Amino acid sequence: MTSAPESEFHEVCAEDDLWAGEMRLCSVAGVEVLLLRTDDGDICALQKNCPHQEHPLEKGEFDGTILTCGAHLWEFDAFSGRSVNPDDAELARYPVKVDGGAVLVSVEGIEPKHSHA
């Protein structure tokens, strides 16, 4: 996912610093995002708070595929950001690219999503 212009990407970490099944909170141009690496090796950047009641997702669990909020156990597919349970919510995804071993993320023009539940 690399639809943002080159100038909007910011380096957040080395690719080797993020292992499969790991997540970490990163600051990108003043916006906190949750960086995850799936079991398949994909690196994803998602909004940091659950859309349900704004609970910090880094306090939840990540099994390498599914990100589970620690407050009310809402589950999200880490790669797509779509919710698994319930099935009508979504996390904002930020464009990610890897260049020369560095992970870069763009947050330009992307707002976190919120649920009405």
Image (cartoon, helix red, strand yellow):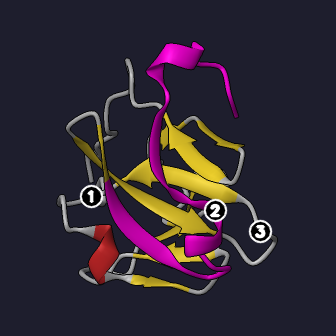
Q: Which residue is mark 1?
A: 49
Q: Is residue 55 above or below residue 80?
A: below
Q: As shown in the figure, which amino acid type bears the numbered disc 1?
A: Asn
Q: Nearer the viewer, residue 17 or 113?
A: 17
Q: What residue is shown at x 28% (from left), y 43% (from top)?
A: 114
Q: Nearer the viewer, mark 2 or mark 1?
A: 2
> Which one is earlier in the sequence, the residue at label 3 or at label 2?
2
The residues colored magenta run: 1-26
Q: State the mark number for residue 41.
A: 3
Q: Quadrant of residue 14?
A: bottom right
Q: Is residue 55 visible?
A: yes
Q: Nearer the viewer, mark 3 or mark 2?
A: 2
Which residue corresponds to the image point at 50% horizontal and 39% vertical from the top-left?
105
Q: Give the image location of residue 10, x and y in percent.
A: 44, 35
At label 3, the amino acid type is Gly
Residue 51 higher or lower than 77, as above or below: above
> In this rendering, would 61 be left or right of 66?
left
Lower position in the chain sequence, tag 2 or tag 1: 2
Q: What's the residue at 60%, 50% (across, down)?
A: 102
The amino acid at mark 2 is Glu
Q: Considering only order in the chain, which callout, 3 or 1, is on the residue closer to the N terminus? A: 3
Q: Secondary structure at mark 2?
A: helix
Q: Secondary structure at mark 3?
A: loop
- Residue 38: horizontal and vertical position, in percent? 69, 71
Vertically, is 98 above or below 38? above
Q: Residue 15: which numbered mark, if any?
A: 2
Q: Nearer the viewer, residue 117 or 12?
A: 12
Query: Residue 107: x and y, percent?
Result: 39, 30
Q: Is residue 25 left or right of residue 14?
A: left
Q: CA distance from mark 2 to mark 1?
A: 23 Å
State the separation of the CA atoms marked 3 and 2: 10 Å
The quarter of the displayed image where residue 4 is located: top right
